[in-house]
Amino acid sequence: MRAIVTGGAGFIGSHVVDALVARGDEVTVLDNLSTGRRENVAERARLVEADLAEAGRVFAEARPEVCFHLAAQADVRVSVDRPDFDAEVNLLGTIHVLEAARMLDAQVIFSSTGGAIYGECDDPAAEESPRRPLAPYGASKLAAEEYLATYNRLHGTQHVSLRYGNVYGPRQDPHGEAGVVAIFFGRLARGEPLRIFGDGRQTRDYVYVGDVVAATLAAQGHAGVFNVGTGTETSVVDLAGACSSVAGLSAPLEHEPARVGELQRSVLDPSLAERELGFRAQTRLHDGLAATWEFVRESEGVAGEGAN
């Protein structure tokens, strides 16, 4: 099959590319390399360095049958400071992809977000739960989802929106501003304290990137909106302890003031994806953390194997 992966040089996108190449697909990566890395792209995939505004040209050349749309502006704080830029990438960029795909009758599988769309959760959020974004990032992703649904109604397409939980795993940037698992491991590798905003009792649904890739590929041929998570919540304090245990390193915790608008509880109900896509997260948190630490340890040049 011919496939395009937007954002395919990034954290999640590069793992999707690996899986597509492994199953024998002809893969084109569309990435402007603003945050992605050329070295993340599998050798058998073709990298086109371009912005989403150029999707029409790239699609016309590659003629994909399916597009895995993972390119995004993913920093919540950037979205608050620059909502126009956030909307340009996440909403207008998605429209460029939808139009390019429409010309070729290609399916779009869109990486959306769970926590940023549902807002504060009283219980594990199902797809029909109220959507209450607290930042422009969640609003732009939700608006893009609505465009996919509109195209499905208007053009009879079968596009899919996948609401990911808090994804972690190898290749996530330990020096970035998003992805607490990678940040914790990066600080452990550098011998720095683990910084926690607020009391650390806020919870998230941490889902391993390998499971996210499995769900993303399983969505092909379906239509609609699906949560991709574990259904299990872990507090930030407990996560810090688990990261220290896996790394076999200890570090003091530094508490800083809670960030304005940060969710206290975010957990997804993944049962619809299990029923309709046959997807269920398989990776235990400890195992996923161990694989992530191994990647960070090697990239940071830290000696030792960590804890088993």
Image (cartoon, rainbow, N blue to C red):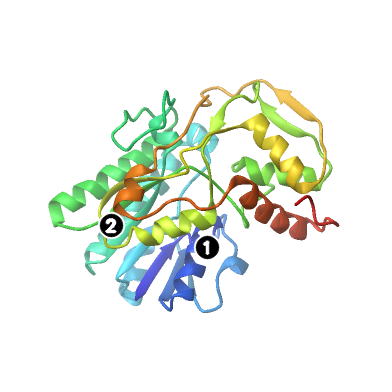
Of circles 2 and 1, the one toward us is 1
The one of 130 and 34 positioned closer to us in this rendering: 130
Residue 62 in which image quadrant: bottom left
Query: Which of pointers 2 and 1 lies earlier in the amino acid sequence?
Result: 1
Any mark on residue 98, and which? 2
Q: What type is the residue that disc 1 sits on?
A: His
Asked whether 147 or 53 is in front, the reply is 147
Residue 276 in the figure: left or right of residue 208:
left
Q: Secondary structure at mark 2?
A: helix
The x, y position of residue 60, in whole percent, is 30, 73
User: Residue 97, relative to residue 117: is it above or below?
Assistant: below
Q: Is residue 216 left or right of residue 31?
A: left
- Which label sits on residue 196? none
**How busy is the neighbourhood of tag 2: few (under 14 within 10 Å), some, or many (20 plus)?**
many
The answer to whether residue 25 shows anywhere in this view is yes
Q: Residues within 10 Å of mark 1 (few under 14, many from 20)?
A: many
Rendered position, 108 above or below 131? below
For the N terminus, which image quadrant?
bottom left
The type of residue carrying mark 2 is Leu
- Left or right, 237 with respect to 232, comes to right
Q: Quadrant of residue 96?
A: bottom left
Disc 2 from disc 1: Cα separation: 22 Å
- What residue is drawn where x is 52% and y is 62%? 15
The numbered disc on residue 15 is 1
Which element type, helix, strand or loop, lies under badge 1? helix
How far from the left and from the top, in percent, is residue 157? 19, 58
Across and down, in percent, residue 256 comes to 70, 23
Residue 42 position within the rendered picture, expressed as x and y whole percent measured from the top left: 55, 73
